[in-house]
Amino acid sequence: MAGPLLRSLWSSTRNTLSSSSSKPYLRPSALARTFSAATAATDATLQRSSLLDPARLRNVAVIAHVDHGKTTLMDRLLRQCGADIPHERAMDSISLERERGITIASKVTSVFWKENELNMVDTPGHADFGGEVERVVGMVEGAVLVVDAGEGPLAQTKFVLAKALKYGLRPILLLNKVDRPAVSEEMCDEVESLVFDLFANLGATEEQLDFPVLYASAKEGWASATFTKEPPADSRNMSQLLDAIIRHVPPPSANVEAPFQMLVSMMEKDFYLGRILTGRVSSGCVRVGDRVHGLRNKDSGVEKIEEGKVVKLMKKKGTNMVLIDSAGAGDIISMAGLASPSIGHTVTSVEVMTALPTVELDPPTISMTFGVNDSPLAGRDGSHLTGGKIGDRLSAEAETNLAINVLPGLSESFEVQGRGELQLGILIENMRREGFELSVSPPKVMYKTENGQRLEPIEEVTIEVNEDHVGLVMEALSHRRAEVLDMGPVPGNDGRTRLSLTCPSRGLVGYRSVFSSATRGTGFMHRAFLTYEKFRGPLGNVRKGVLVSMGYGTITSYALMSLEPRGTLFVTPGMETYDGMIVGEHSRETDLDVNPVRNKELTNIRSAGKDENVKLSPPRLMTLEEAIGYVASDELIEVTPKSIRLRKKYLDVNKRKTMSKRQKE
């Protein structure tokens, strides 16, 4: 019904425009506007019918390991279904996502295909953002598992797949990048066997093990039910994958006659509408103007949060958010009208006092302390400086990101608990772009105690390096208490070795930059939380001492010239410094106090060496992620909108010595 109606509307609109236009073609912008107007009636018709027939709905998530082509695949699926994609990686709408090339937050959109409406959920592939996967898998019945045909399943493939299987999703395996020269049919068969073994090890049911397999090149925009590298011209599209979704993914089990209930899975804030709550309608129907209230589960029972009226109902169609009048069970929608409910709460009709069960999240594994910036250079760059402002911002983040916990600390500080360095680094980067100044402690691993035994988080790590670098990597990881599980050549890639190992989370803090240097940028490392195990003992020597400033003012070339032989510098001439600021890494294991603001003595005797002849090596300028992994327990990161500085926790040198003696005692 929808297909012929859409085609007839498009055909009639195109013919009308062609007859009324004197030009042989229409501009793309005019075509887009005309197509939007022509499909408006179709969207309304489909929305009304989906309210009555949930059997035409399909809710599916796209899950994958990082860089296996998931976001590119979403682009091709949207284009295949007629959506207007303004640029590549259209689902990555956050600025940091586009800058870093990773998916940070889950997003949902809907497309129409052969009289069916598909609600597609794009999820992150990085384990640090696992909370984004956990909170949305409850909205869908199926999942497209994207696996690189050349690399096979990796650590984070296992992580996201485990979440999907836990909630009973019906998976579809899509082997991507099969058009690469090194990929063969035999290699795809081997990867398929590895994925099947992974399913079995994760406890998949017989239905889940009976998954269809498709082959694709998301970059080229095609998918095939049989292995091929060059499909026929009329098959170079995503139609076979879309057909497989409709056949294999079951429609949502929905009771339209029951009272309205919806579990909130996503939340965002709008300047005009307030909170916009997104989730799947579990039962019943909702219309604009209906009276609803928010509920939450507590130990004492179900608590009513707020009662109000549905002001707006919205649905993401392609890349645009459109208004709708009503929605039925099984559909994924957004609504506005309530100011208090958050993620994990239930929005329901006022006569219902039963809250839906919430999603269980994995516990956080690391924590960092966010506090007020109290350095001598504080207040120069930022506009949000107080502990109250920092606390309000962190509380707002905890509302929209369930994987982050915020606990109050001492003297206007806050303990922020999360999944990993990258997740907390993204939060800090967002805050500094919003004008915050703050001091941040180094990451601390969150331990557990069971039966009197100390347990620590262990991560599963997959590493791929050139054979020449295996020794350096193994030596560095041995100091970090890693244990090798498997080691062997990479299939189809001579001269490369793949390592599978387990390592404590504390041992991997700051190792990524060391790994990049050791492998000269040619290595790949992927990690994902595995389990809690017995404490593996203290780490080896993983960092040298630092050069600590004992002067205040502007750094000079003359001073740095004499400091350069002492180690690696983190600063350049002209930068500001103060007592206790870290200006470099010492070449030895101990810290060294230095004076980077020293000037050349002025005399009436001409010097043979002039200042303009001073040549310094390029400094090592720390990025935020490098700084998070570098600082030691007695150090802090000073974060401002314009600068990232490293400093000692105690700026006074005498106090540092006193505290060091106390710790040794």
Image (cartoon, rainbow, N blue to C red):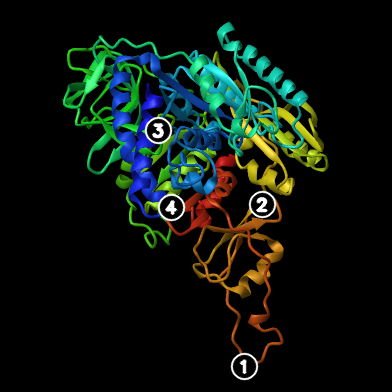
Quadrant location of the C terminus in the rendered image: top right
Q: Which of 650 and 572 is in front in this view?
A: 572
Q: In which quarter of the image is residue 188?
A: top right
Q: Residue at x 58, y 63 (%)?
A: 571
Please state, as top left, top right, bottom left or bottom right, where the N terminus lies in the image: top left
Per the model, the C-alpha gap separating discs 4 and 3 is 51 Å
Inspect the image, locate mark 1, and give the three-letter code of the amino acid beneath it: Asn
- Amino acid type at image mark 4: Pro
> Circles 1 and 2: CB distance less than 8 Å?
no
Between disc 3 and disc 1, whose residue precedes? 3
- Please state which amino acid type lies under the numbered disc 3: Asn
- Mark 4 secondary-structure assignment: loop
Looking at the image, residue 444 lies above or below residue 557: above
Front position in the image: 438 or 41 = 41
For the residues labelled 2 and 4, the Cα–Cα distance comes to 76 Å
User: Which one is earlier in the sequence, the residue at label 4 or at label 3?
Assistant: 4
Residue 236 falls left or right of residue 131? right
The residue depicted at 70 percent of the width and 37 percent of the height is 540
Instruction: Between label 4 and label 3, give the one nearer the viewer.
Output: 4
Residue at numbered disc 1: 604
Tag of residue 24: 4
> Which is nearer the N-term, disc 2 or disc 4?
4
Q: Could you tell me residue 60's position as x and y percent?
A: 47, 22
Of circles 2 and 3, which is in front?
3
Residue where numbered disc 3 is placed: 401
- SS of the residue at dot 1? loop
Q: Which amino acid does label 2 sit on?
A: Thr
